Amino acid sequence: MDGMRNSQYRYIETRKIAGSLGAEISGVNLADDLDDAVIAEIRAALLDNLVVFFRDQDLSPERQLAFAKRWGEIHLHPFMVGMSDIPEVLEIRKTPADKRNFGGSWHTDQMFSPKPAMGTMLYAKQVPSVGGDTMFSNQYLAYDALSDGMKRMLGRMKGVCVGDKKRGGKSRLDFNAATIAMKTVAPPPDVQTTSVHPVVRTHPETGRKSLYIGSHVHWFEGMSEEESAPLITFLREHSARPEFLCRFRWQNGSMAFWDNRCTQHFAINDYPAETRVMHRITIRGDMPF
């Protein structure tokens, strides 16, 4: 695409940013109460490109939430505290004092939940002068590139996805308290934070198969962590091969909307002396199959 209007759309324009996935959408003001026909075209662009980006948006948390609700029920993060007046919006803030960033590993959001997030909307409030990009990976392509033998084996396997990742013997709460300023809490007792999902997932809207792996997968069902580790390492490295990736350079007022059912993403921590502030909303999904 060279930035010209895509003939399949009437209300939006799309411009691909990489051969693997990702497209910028123009001609839309997300602060407006958009017609259903416009929402339908954004959905079609999302399904086709896996992640879509909008530039020069002026979104209050209330307007971002109103747009997100057009896509389904909001999925609250069980470990992280949302904004005091709008808890559905999680402010992701990294300052020079933080030792690491939030989301700095290849993952798909809320994979440890029985019904992981369908989509994520991330809006840039303050970005560093350089750095702080986000990378995305096309997991349809990652699956397609596997050998037939590997596909057959993985088609029978399930991954155990853990939310309270232990690092150096510390729980998520203790580890976060020592490395980031964002507030972490213990999840409600009735919220499940360990789930078992297929390693090969079928997208409920496109019907395509994708690799469903990421940092939340700790071992395979029926296997020990030691037995699982070599294959998990291979799949994680395979799923982030360069030919599956795109990279988005943020600007203030940019918003990304990605499909967690067929992508992974990675927030790059390369701005140690600057601050980055983003507003995130996740949309509830269905049970992977």
Image: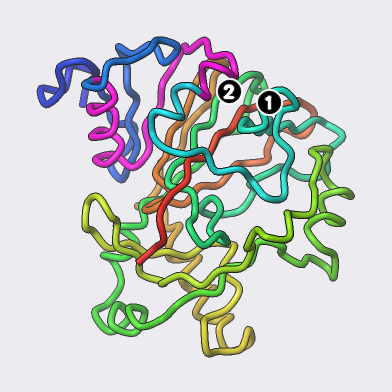
Does residue 59 show up magenta in the picture?
A: yes
Task: Name the chief secondary structure element in magenta.
Answer: helix
In this rendering, position of residue 175 left or right of residue 17: right
Name the quadrant of the C terminus. Answer: bottom left
As drawn, 129 above or below 52: above
Q: Which is nearer the eye, 172 or 72? A: 72
Please tell me whether residue 275 belongs to the stretch shown in magenta: no
- Above/below status of 225 relative to 90: below
- Looking at the picture, how far across and down is residue 81, in whole percent? 74, 39
Q: Residue at x 55, y 59 (%)?
A: 113
> What is the x, y in percent for residue 51?
38, 38
Residues in magenta, as a range: 38-65
- The amino acid on which the numbered mark 2 sits, given as a three-letter code, is Ala
Marks 2/1 in contact by CB < 8 Å: the verdict is yes
Residue under label 1: 277
Q: Residues within 10 Å of mark 2 (few under 14, many from 20)?
A: many
Q: Quadrant of residue 151?
A: bottom left
Q: Quadrant of the N terminus?
A: top left
The residue beneath circle 2 is: 124
Give me the residue at 21% from left, 15% from top.
Answer: 11
Distance CA(mark 2)–CA(mark 1): 6 Å
Residue 57 position in % (x across, y down): 47, 13
Question: Which residue is located at x 61 percent, y 68 percent?
Answer: 194
Quarter holding residue 119:
top left
90 lies left or right of 201: right
